[in-house]
Amino acid sequence: MTSDADSRSRFEAVASGWVGAVGVTVALAALVAWSVQARMDVLMASPFPLGVDGYFYPIQLRSLVEGNGLAIPASPLSFYLMLPFAAATDPITGAKLGAAVLGALVALPMYGVGVQLGGRRATGLVAAALATVSAGSMYLTIEFVKNGIGITVGVAALWCVIRALEKPTRGWVGVAVAATVAAALTHKMAAGMVIAVAVPAAITEAAGRGVLRGRRLIYLLATLGGVAIVALIAGLVAPKRFLSPSDLGLVVRALGGPIEWDLPALVTRNLRITLGHEALIAAGVVVFAAIALLAEREHTVGRGLQAMLRVRRERRSPLTPGMHTAAWMIVLLGVVIALPVLDVHDPQGLGFRLRIAAFVPMALGAAIALRLVLAVLPTSAANGLLLVVAIGLALRTPGRRTEGAVMVHPALVTSAYGLTSKLQPGQVVIMPERHLAFLIGWYTRAPVRIRPEGVPKERRVRVLPLGVFIGVGSPLDKQLMRARTAPGVAPPIGVHPRHPNGMVLVPEATWDWMIERLPPKARDHWAPWPTI
């Protein structure tokens, strides 16, 4: 009888495990599929790429499809991950498909990390739901595709790191190192986030296991030093591809902005968006996560919280020292992202990108905070509650999915097409606005630069947009009209279908002629070539 009862109990446990695994697999597959569809609905609403850097990705993918490598220096892995989509369709459609699929796949590593730090499958599902359908994740898919893919790869690397902390075998350590390298090859910010969590967590785990002694300590220090030297050399040789010493300045500048008490906002000259107040939500979530972590420690504060919250010690799923440190680093990330002094005015700056990525500590912080729920409520009640929360989050999260999206006006596409017959072989287009520079590069295949320095004057040709550079009725606007009829001056060529100065091709000699004849104040503004 006892044997039959034990066998039945083991069978029920195995069956329950299989049912749970199948249920989670179905839930994650449905979440990813729904998220891909939602992202593609937004991306395919326009036949043109979306976002400030929209045409940057088709340019890179077209170059890869044609076998020429990357056209513009950048961290390479994200483009190779998108390459199969471009090869199966075309560079523009492939970029959209890659952005949607690789952005939605963040659900999988989020689930993995959420399970490890939260202690249950249900906490992993909550983390996956929060991240996948977040407004910030959608914004990255629309505006900063490489950043969004970097988050997916970075969280996957974080999952491997935490798994290696839990089971520090050679195999898992090797996988964690390889995944961290993959994050570094995908996006700088993602790599920085992984390193910020992984290094202190690994050191804490090694110290907790008592292995930081004698030769092992020397080996660890030598390894860290060697990795730092390799990373420094890579950054110096290819600063646009890898983390470099110059990126430290981005960190300093990110924390030195004007104080913005409107915590969730992203603020630029032409943009103020909130992305569902996710930065503010993340700040609140990580506070509860910190309480959950404190309640697990055997010290005065921890025991006081355990007594007050009636934590069932035998029900807690303990974290290893390294995992505990990793959880605290995620809490710290949530706090930094919500700081009012974070400079979010520059869309290309670190502060702006960090504020968008608030969904990362929001989701993982929620998994950590829910450890308290698991420690206080009965298992069935806790799991049921978390499943309801995960489903609710998947169905409805705050924030508009198209908030802050930059669309391409068809007139600008027509203008870029018009330039193809006006440019001469060997000419380099100097365009002061990043978004239009990529657009022109896509349609004309001509080399395009933001700054004129380093380009021989005889090869330069300026392309001036009206709205963001010339300005309607400005001295430059009037000078462009005069240059069209001035004797001995190569006339500016308008290519915009609706305005003579909507987009103008200006030979370098004509540009110099106009600058010399501008009023002093206007000359001081335009002569340095202000870029956007």
Image: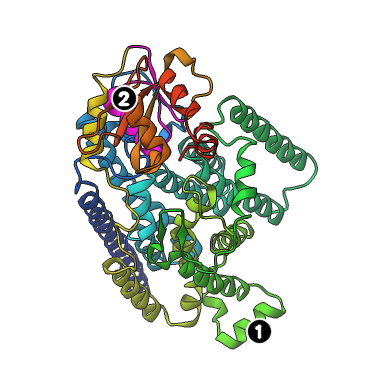
Q: Nearer the viewer, residue 494 or 283?
A: 494
> Type of residue at label 2?
Arg
**Residue at screen point 34% across, 73% down:** 389
Q: Which residues are magenta?
A: 425-450
In the foreground, 428 or 299: 428
- The quarter holding residue 398 reads bottom left
Horizontal side, residue 412 vs residue 372: left or right = left
Numbered mark located on residue 100 in the image: none
Q: Within 10 Å of the Cα at label 1, are there few (<14), some (14-19), or many (20+) other Cα atoms?
A: some
Element class at badge 1: helix
Query: Quick one: label 1 or label 2, which is nearer the N terminus?
Result: 1
Q: Residue at x 23, y 26 (%)?
A: 418
Q: Position of residue 408 (x, y in %)?
A: 27, 43
In terms of secondary structure, where does tag 2 sit?
Answer: loop
Between marks 1 and 2, how big is the CA–CA gap? 80 Å
Which amino acid type corresponds to the residue marked 1 in the rendered image? Gly
Q: Is residue 194 left or right of residue 109?
A: right
Is the residue 454 above or below the residue 36 in the image? above
Number of marks in the image? 2
Q: Position of residue 482 (x, y in %)?
A: 35, 28
Residue 421 image offset from top left, x and y in percent: 23, 19
Does the residue at mark 1 contact the one at mark 2 (Cβ under 8 Å)?
no
- Residue drawn at the location 50% of the way across and 36% of the way down: 519
Q: Farthest residue to the right: give it.
A: 214
Q: Quadrant of the N terminus?
A: bottom left
For the residue pair 115 and 414, the one nearer the viewer reads as 414
The residue indicated by pointer 1 is: 304
- Residue 484 - label: 2
**Res 146 quadrant in image:** top left
